[in-house]
Image (cartoon, rainbow, N blue to C red):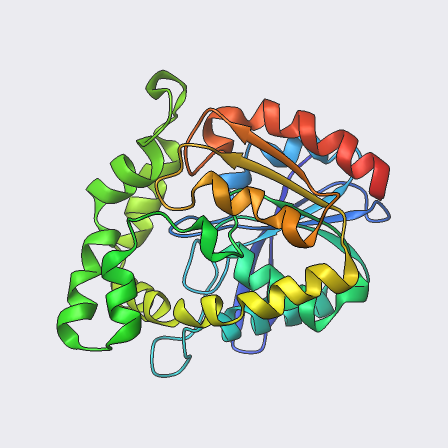
Amino acid sequence: MTVLYKNQQVGDVNVFYREAGRKDAPVLLLLHGFPSSSHMFRDLIPQLSDTYRVIAPDLPGFGYTKAPARGAFEYTFDNLAAVIGDFVEALELKEYALYIFDYGAPVGLRLAVAHPERVTAIISQNGNAYLDGFSDGWGAWQAYWRDDTPENREACRASLSADVIENWQYRTGTTPRLLSPDGYMLDIALMARPGAEEIQLDLIRDYATNVERYPEFQAYFREYQPPFLAVWGRHDPAFVPAGAEAFKRDLPDAQVHLLDTGHFALETHCREIVGFIRPFLARHL
């Protein structure tokens, strides 16, 4: 199935997205994380587009989506979700399953809370919604949430460095010979664009709003019981396996599978993840 590379104007934001599959097929909306883009789904999309209409947008501030500069656009998770919500409306997606990863989790769960009737199923790949999921590697970010000072903001800048992106986010917990450099090299290059770091620091500060909304997300799970699959890199240095298991508290029928890899599990375990997704979606879509 041919993958198409398209753009959709949403207000002042020109959203870049990848799409494959029949127009009348059930929709799977893929939401990427930090510091990546829809490029992280490059191997997954062809594996699912024979059965599903797979759509993967780049969030504002990431990838090839064109959004206004800081000052003209406030880079918050509420605004990222608002843009993707308007993107969904522009594409006239009446129902969709969500694949949420990292930053894509709080964005996607905002969509689910706003329109629970549209969400047919949720797949979380290292997409957190519980305090249990945080590792001990969040110290600088949490200090910034508690106290918005220039010093605390500057302390978070190391998270955006090429070394941290490659070695902490991508390589930790993986089998190196299975890890293509394509993902982290593109992320590093895009992070080096003028103004990109300041946008990301704004989002790091605003990440505290996601934690504040965890009880709301969990209440959505309890009330609506969406079919739920967690496929989680067990060696993720940011989101630990307890965060995957925690979904079962509110979703007793949730499936949880821990893979022998790190944060960017698709980079090394795409085939295994597809093996879990296909029967899961076949039962629920």
The residue lying furthest to the bottom in this view is 72
Q: From where the camera sits, is residue 255 visible?
A: yes
Q: Nearer the viewer, residue 36 or 204?
A: 204
Q: Residue at x 57, y 48 (%)?
A: 246
Q: Nearer the viewer, residue 84 or 259?
A: 259
Q: Is residue 58 left or right of residue 157?
A: right
Q: Residue at x 28, y 43 (%)?
A: 165
The location of residue 42, given as percent across then percent down, is: 54, 36
The residue lying furthest to the left in this view is 151
Residue 31 higher or lower than 151, as above or below:
above
Q: Residue at x 16, y 62 (%)?
A: 155
Quadrant for the C terminus in the image: top right
Q: Is residue 100 left or right of residue 60?
A: right
The location of residue 113, given as percent across then percent down, is: 68, 69
Q: Nearer the viewer, residue 35 or 252?
A: 252
Residue 7 higher or lower than 149, as above or below:
above
Q: Is residue 96 left or right of residue 98?
A: right
The residue lying furthest to the front in this view is 249
Q: From where the camera sits, is residue 1 visible?
A: no
